[in-house]
Image (cartoon, rainbow, N blue to C red):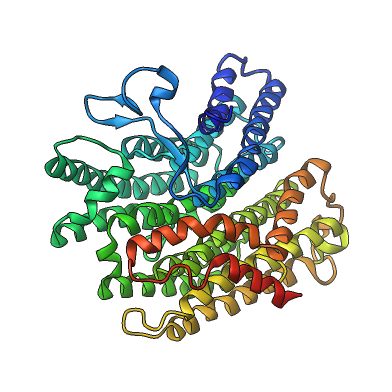
Amino acid sequence: MYNHILSIILFTPLLGALLLLFVPKENKNAIRWIANLFALAGLVVSLPLAPWFWAVKGKTGFQFMEGFVDWSARGAQGNWIPSIGASYTLGIDGISFLLIMLTTLLGFISILSSWTAIEERVKEYYIWFLILQTGMLGVFMSLDFFLFYVFWEVMLVPMYLLIGIWGGPRKLYAAIKFFLYTLVGSVAMLLGILFLYFHHYKLTGIYTFSVEALYKTAPLIDPDKAVWVFLGFFLAFAIKVPMFPFHTWLPDAHTEAPTAGSVILAGVLLKMGTYGLIRFSLPLFPAIVQDEMMRSAMMWLSIIAILYGALVTLMQKDMKRLIAYSSVSHLGFCTLGIFALNPLGLAGSVLQQINHGISTGALFLIVGILYERRHSREISEYGGISTVMPVYAAITLIMFMSSLGLPLLNGFIGEFTILQGTFMEKSIAGHSGLFWTAWAVGGVVLGAAYLLWLYQRVFFGPVTNPKNEKLADLTPRELATLIPLVVLAFVIGIYPKPFFQILEQPVNQIVKTVRPDYPVNAPSLSVAAADDEKGKR
């Protein structure tokens, strides 16, 4: 299992999807049990990865490398489709490790949350959801561009169907919009991949899609051409994040998707964009991302996303749409940390991606629970809910505080580290780090405003609507979906040091690639984390 842990994690959900093909569609309970068992199995088989990775966390490069030869015992390492130089090569570092663990956890929670919510075409729903899980895991594991692109596209169809078949009243509009936006970005990225592929052949005489091989030759591209290749990758990742102004598909997709679809979309799929920026855009195009004009554009787009997303969130009347727009603001912090181009900014960005998956995933579950009981997400329909659903109200308050960045909860650690990394830069695109940090802090204040306003309207005061007087509190199954996320929010918020230690080596390596003269070991992330803990005590 140790030698093939990544492949086992990758294909466990797909095995469940294949098994469901042979189960009669009329037997809905059996389908639900099988889907949930395989989703749980996907989480369980990923758990040994945690202690195993912890043992090698300080090593340079990717760990748990797997290739096609490991399975076939034929040919060269990773020799999958030799005629085009494509390989089945998997590997992870601290960044992808954390995102894989988030994916397996949220995948199980999302499928468990669907038990009573999905009544039509149950078999197809769970099959597509498990295929989606495999696609997401493949993106975080792939070290071959051909394989990466296959998994990137595999995610597109299941998500399109989840929204288009099991979504809300405007599901077709939202699904088509999501598909078209993502497809445009995917085509642009494909052109960029092909350029890198042929450029590598021109320099070495070897056709390969190996990520590690292309890392070495991509910086040698002519600067005028490199800008266009960078923009091709950037478009794909910016749409997926989504960065302003490519964000307009997100509120519609979130609003119309089923609850589990919204959880996995916010919790994992949006991280594909930020992961792509960190894994590919930075190390492949170090000269481009350091260019003052390009870096200025990235920083301003991040600041606009933070402030615009928060301001639009304040105007929403639909709870789900409100949380969707808040994601635009929160992911703006993540891209701000990425383009700060220092270890603290990058580590804070990755940790905030994990935090966003935990807190926003929980918020979509919370809204979905209320929607199942009342079939309404309008804020005006509620009031005084804490009186009839006290446990639900308490958990909601914790996750709201997590999302707005209250100290001792996970959101604070991520935002603080990003702002610290931005602040410590003497100059970014002609402005001091203080200039960019001051703008970003406005998003923190606005985040508290819209979340506290929402909580006050929905939970405080007397029960204003007679339909809410007999609402049932959380069931054991619903508690099972929320409790792990609450626990993680406290664990990361109180003791984030292990997460920074996992991220220290990969983010230092990326910064060293992009900015060779930057002193990546000063300050050390582990030292910074330790100092932060001492300050709290």
Q: Nearer the viewer, residue 374 or 485?
A: 485
Q: Nearer the viewer, residue 273 or 80?
A: 80
Q: Quadrant of the N terminus?
A: top right
Residue 77 sits in quarter: top left
Residue 278 sits in quarter: bottom left
Q: Quadrant of the C terminus?
A: bottom right
Q: Position of residue 367 (x, y in %)?
A: 68, 54
Q: Position of residue 120 (x, y in %)?
A: 62, 30
Q: Position of residue 426 (x, y in %)?
A: 40, 83
Residue 220 sits in quarter: bottom left
Left or right relative to 491: residue 296: left
> Which residue is painted at 74% across and 72% down in the image?
456
Report if residue 257 is visible in the image: no
> Which residue is painted at 71% across and 26% down in the image?
33
> Which residue is painted at 30% across and 39% down in the image?
210
Report if residue 454 is visible in the image: yes
Left or right relative to 340: residue 292: left
Placement of 17 over or under 465, stated as above or below: above
> Which residue is painted at 22% across and 24% down in the image?
83
Placement of 407 over or under 28, stated as above or below: below
Left or right relative to 509: residue 364: right
Q: Position of residue 515 (x, y in %)?
A: 33, 67
